[in-house]
Amino acid sequence: MKRIFSGVQPTGNLHLGNYLGAIRNWVRLQADYECLYCVVDLHAITMPQDPVALKNATREVAASLLAAGIDPAHSIVFNQSQVGAHAELAWIFNCIARIGWLNRMTQFKEKAGKQRDSASAGLYIYPNLMAADILLYKATHVPVGEDQKQHLELTRQIAGSFNSTYGVELFPMVEPLILGAATRVMNLRDGTKKMSKSDASDFTRINLTDSPDAIVQKIRKAKTDPNPLPEAAQGLEERPEAANLIGIFAALSDDSVESVCRRFAGAQFSAFKEQLATLAIDTLAPITGEMRRLLADVSYIDRTLREGAEKARAIADPILRETQSIVGFLRP
Ligand code: TYM
């Protein structure tokens, strides 16, 4: 059986990186897999959150998923905190994962920065919760952007270690699905940094809620280099900003980087950027419009998440009980 699980944090606006690296693929994969898509609010509080803003962001992110084409009649869409089993399985994995494994996680190092000692303990064990999210459903495939690859390797390590510690074949080895031409969308102002929700400048990213005008401005102001566009993908080496914009164009038009290079060979960035902005607006404007429409009826979003959580619990609870019994918890 093939089952997909993936998650997104409700921390601020979703951006083009989330869309091209993950959500667009989630929509497409619905045709071939049983899918669970989760707004991971337990993960969000590993960093400080304003409670009212967190509730709003959870609804907004859920609305973006539905607006992008995730069908709640077909896929299970819910927010993590409504399914208590995530935290219960995570505890068991906290006792399986070794501190040395967590010490290798680059995302913790990036997020904790120099203030390592004052980072929350939750941020440190975050990858164990992520492993629990996936394995709680015995998911086999996980569509994510490039930045989550290391966490998925840890998930495999935890699954393997659990199985061998207890001499069982309970958890599957999950396969990451890192798909498309833009698996790591970069910051529009610095092509060596990832596009991220947390960057202080809004000009570094394109949000799913941006107006067409804002998209045009951001793409116009995006950093480039003085050379014209290359004829082949090879010419993008050492040109991170050009590589990023061409990668975005390729992903948005479902084309390859090679073919986008051939199409714009020798062109100036100004002409290319105009076409890129049009393409981005054509893709995002319908999603933004639908998201606004959905958010006008918060009760619909809340009901969808509640029903999704019920369906998720029906899969998760027996798997949690089986795991607890293997570990030796007495549950008469
Ligand atoms: P999050 O919320 O940071 O991002 C959600 C998804 O978007 C992808 N992504 C990107 N892809 C390409 N370019 C970018 N610049 C970019 N930025 C983000 C991410 O790879 C991700 O797929 N830990 C996860 C959430 C999570 C999860 C899970 C994912 C919790 N449990 C279980 C999969 C399975 C996170 O913080 O994603």
Image (cartoon, helix red, strand yellow):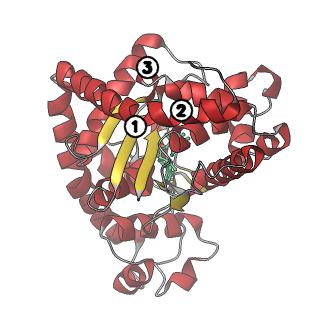
**First in sequence: mark 1 or mark 2?**
1
Ligand 1 neighbours mark 3 (CB distance < 8 Å): no
Q: Secondary structure at mark 1?
A: helix
Name the residue carrying label 3: 54
Residue 249 drawn at (x, y percent): 37, 67
Ligand 1 neighbours mark 1 (CB distance < 8 Å): no
Residue 221 visible in the displayed image: no
Residue 320 badge: 2
Mark 1, other Cα within 10 Å: few <14 / some 14–19 / many ≥20: few
The residue type indicated by label 3 comes to Leu
The residue type indicated by label 1 comes to Ile
Residue 194 drawn at (x, y percent): 57, 51
Mark 3, other Cα within 10 Å: few <14 / some 14–19 / many ≥20: some
Name the residue carrying label 1: 315
Q: Secondary structure at mark 2?
A: helix
Left or right, 153 with respect to 199, comes to right
Q: What residue is rendered at 43% in x and 19% in y?
A: 54
Q: What residue is rendered at 45% in x and 41% in y?
A: 7
Vertical comparison of 22 with 128: above or below: below
Q: What residue is rendered at 44% in x and 69% in y?
A: 181
The residue type indicated by label 2 comes to Leu
Left or right, 118 with respect to 176, comes to right
Question: Is the C terminus in the top left, top right, bottom left or bottom right quadrant?
Answer: top right
Front of the two marks 2 and 3:
2
Q: Looking at the image, which is closer to me, 273 or 121?
A: 121
Q: CA distance from mark 2 to mark 3?
A: 27 Å
Q: CA distance from mark 1 to mark 3?
A: 26 Å
Q: Looking at the image, which is closer to me, 206 or 15?
A: 15
